[in-house]
Amino acid sequence: MSVRDRVRGRVRQAWVGDAVLAVVVGAIVAVAAGLGDGGAGLFDYALIGAGSVALAVHRRAPRAVLAVTTACLLGEVLYGGASSVAAIPVVAAVHTAARASHRGLAALAAGVFLAGFAVAGEASDDVVQRTLLLAGWFLCALVTGLADKNWQAYLRQTEQRALEAERTREEAALRRAGEERLRIARELHDSLTHSISIVKLQAGVAVHIARKRGEDIPPALLAIQEASGEAMRELRSTLTVLRTDEPTGSPALLVERARAAGLAVELTVRGRERTLAGDLERAAYRIVQEGLTNAARHAGGSAKVTVGLDYGERVLGVQVEDDGVADAGQAPVEGTGLTGMRERVASLGGTLRAGPRVEGGFLVRAELPLEYGALASEVPAGHVGDFAGQGGSPGEARVTADAGWPREGG
């Protein structure tokens, strides 16, 4: 729980506590008035109730509460007779007013109530003693109110420092993550770009010389030239992502690229397509990208690939499947790219299944909660069935992201 959530929880608890305190104080004063010598009438209980219940909102309007409580209980003292217990709500109101920096008004209300209390009582030593005792109560209320004010100010400063520290930690974490991405991008550029460029250049020179001499170009040489060019494009795309932390396109664009590369791909979109949060957009893009890359490498040239996006109310479904040569009995071997996909889905609280289909081919299916912080258990169980009939059973789709990968990839 964050510091802000803890602060809100304490505020709610304070409001409940104030209401309970007002009821308890009113009950005590009402019982004392009823047990007095002259008893208490309906008007007495009305004054006591109004003056006590007003204490429930002392945090929002301390001056109004002070005025209402003092007037009501002073009226009760003048009407029903001097009673020390009747001063309890006024003492509480004086304390809250002093805590809210209204010391002058609090002292004035205490003086007015004490004067009325002395007038309501008979001229005797007992009344003088009780008045002096109440004066001590009011003085303590003023002092404790000022002390409470200073304590509350200290608590607010501490909470503000905690909130600032939490915000600073988040900013520092984001900054460190950005710096790390830039460092990785520089390392990849300095190490891989040069080597791949040399391979591509040498392959291109060899192909050019072979054509110039009229010789047959070895298929392996052409494959090296094509693969090195594709590696350069992928590397540039990766470096762009590392520097900007944003996808370089959309799943639809990935499908078009795969078709241009000779892969038979079909895109299916269900639900109301809409803009999602950045983390979800990136996760969907990377899942589709990794699924298409795996299909291109392992499914076989004649395989058909289907990419599915399902925009639900609470869940985004992403699926990539092919009817390639994957064998359901093949031992799981986890590759780097697939591991990254699994970790990305797990970090968003989603679920993932990846493995060979019973009827042949390979299936990658992920479900990502549309709300941040949502747990995988919150995903509606029936939602997985939207992809039923496209490979695998709905029950299999609930396998968590810890499932092993049955082929090496990424």
Image (cartoon, rainbow, N blue to C red):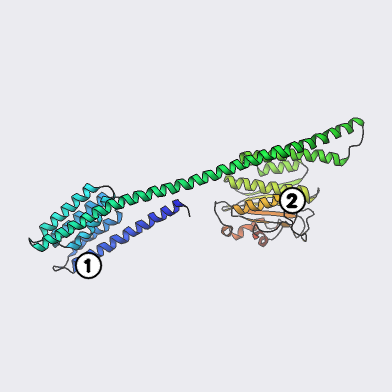
Callout count:
2
Q: Is residue 198 left or right of residue 352?
A: right
User: Dot 1: what SS?
Assistant: helix
Q: Is residue 155 left or right of residue 210?
A: left
Q: Which residue is mark 2?
A: 409
Q: Give above or below for 125 relative to 193.
A: below
Residue 116 pos. (x, y %): 13, 55
Residue type of the residue flagged with mark 2 = Gly
366 or 10: which is nearer to us?
10
Can residue 268 be seen by looking at this rendering?
no
Can residue 298 be seen by looking at this rendering?
yes
Residue 191 pos. (x, y %): 72, 39
Residue 148 pos. (x, y %): 30, 53
Q: Is residue 58 left or right of residue 361?
A: left
Q: Image point 21% across, 47% down: which residue?
A: 104
Q: Residue furthest left?
A: 123
Residue type of the residue flagged with mark 1 = Val
Q: Which residue is mark 1?
A: 31
Question: Mark 1 packing: few (<14 Cα in 10 Å), some, or many (20+)?
Answer: some
User: Dot 2: what SS?
Assistant: loop
Q: Earlier in the sequence, mark 2 or mark 1?
A: 1
